Amino acid sequence: GENVEQHPSTLSVQEGDSAVIKCTYSDSASNYFPWYKQELGKRPQLIIDIRSNVGEKKDQRIAVTLNKTAKHFSLHITETQPEDSAVYFCAASLPANQAGTALIFGKGTTLSVSS
Amino acid sequence: DGGITQSPKYLFRKEGQNVTLSCEQNLNHDAMYWYRQDPGQGLRLIYYSQIVNDFQKGDIAEGYSVSREKKESFPLTVTSAQKNPTAFYLCASSTWTGYNEQFFGPGTRLTVL
């Protein structure tokens, strides 16, 4: 089945720096790749997603890139702020012939932004 | 934060007892999901349901059971067969057409005493 690896597990940056989190997936049939942010004590919330027919997507300070050939995708956060501190999860959809949009998640990256 | 609710927020259970976690949504979503969250393990898929009266096992279904008798509800039972049930449980829902955001509930923290 699908397996998602996420790196690094922890990331510390200074305010204003960029942060990059990388994920790889195993099943080439996966076609949807969302990123979720979970603040301490809160539920995960979608921050950006990308579909397999797109190589890059940007929303203000966050961007996601997808390389289907290499089966990896990355989250880029520019001009980081203390409120970006949270746990970030990548995910890949199970192949459509099995489960539509059921997701397999990476283990998460704890991002700490110090001012 | 409305739309999908879970109860209770905290739950304590003695070893050997079954316990049922509630998940309700009023978003008119077809699909519902249960995840287990442990420190450093991310979110692991337990069960998911695309439509009423149908559900599929995820990666870690052993020791768990679900039902989907109504579109709005997807309760999860943690049985005594689950060897390490202490965890944070998250329910989510989404539409089932194409690629769609999963909306998460606030979670239930289960502790086995």
Image (cartoon, rainbow, N blue to C red):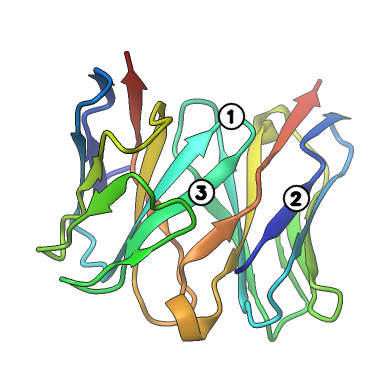
State the SS at label 3: strand
For the residues beneath circles 2 and 3, the answer to whether they share a chain is no
- Tell me the CA gap for discs 2 and 3: 14 Å
Picture disc at residue B39: 1
Picture disc at residue A55: none
Callout 2 crowding tier (Cα within 10 Å): few <14, some 14–19, many ≥20 = many
The disc numbered 1 marks a residue on which chain?
Answer: B
Question: Looking at the picture, how far across and down is residue B36, in whole percent?
Answer: 44, 42
Question: Looking at the picture, how far across and down is residue A22, in whole percent?
Answer: 81, 54
The disc numbered 2 marks a residue on which chain?
Answer: A
Q: Residue at x 23, y 74 (%)?
A: B51
Q: Residue at x 81, y 20 (%)?
A: A115
Q: Nearer the viewer, residue A93 or A45?
A: A93
Q: Looking at the image, can residue A60 be seen?
A: no
Q: Residue at x 44, y 39 (%)?
A: A43
Picture disc at residue A6: 2
Picture disc at residue B44: 3
State the SS at label 2: strand
Callout 1 crowding tier (Cα within 10 Å): few <14, some 14–19, many ≥20 = few
Amino acid type, callout 2: Gln
Amino acid type, callout 3: Arg
Question: Looking at the picture, how far across and down is residue B79, in whole percent?
Answer: 25, 38
Q: Nearer the viewer, residue B45 or B63?
A: B63
Amino acid type, callout 1: Pro
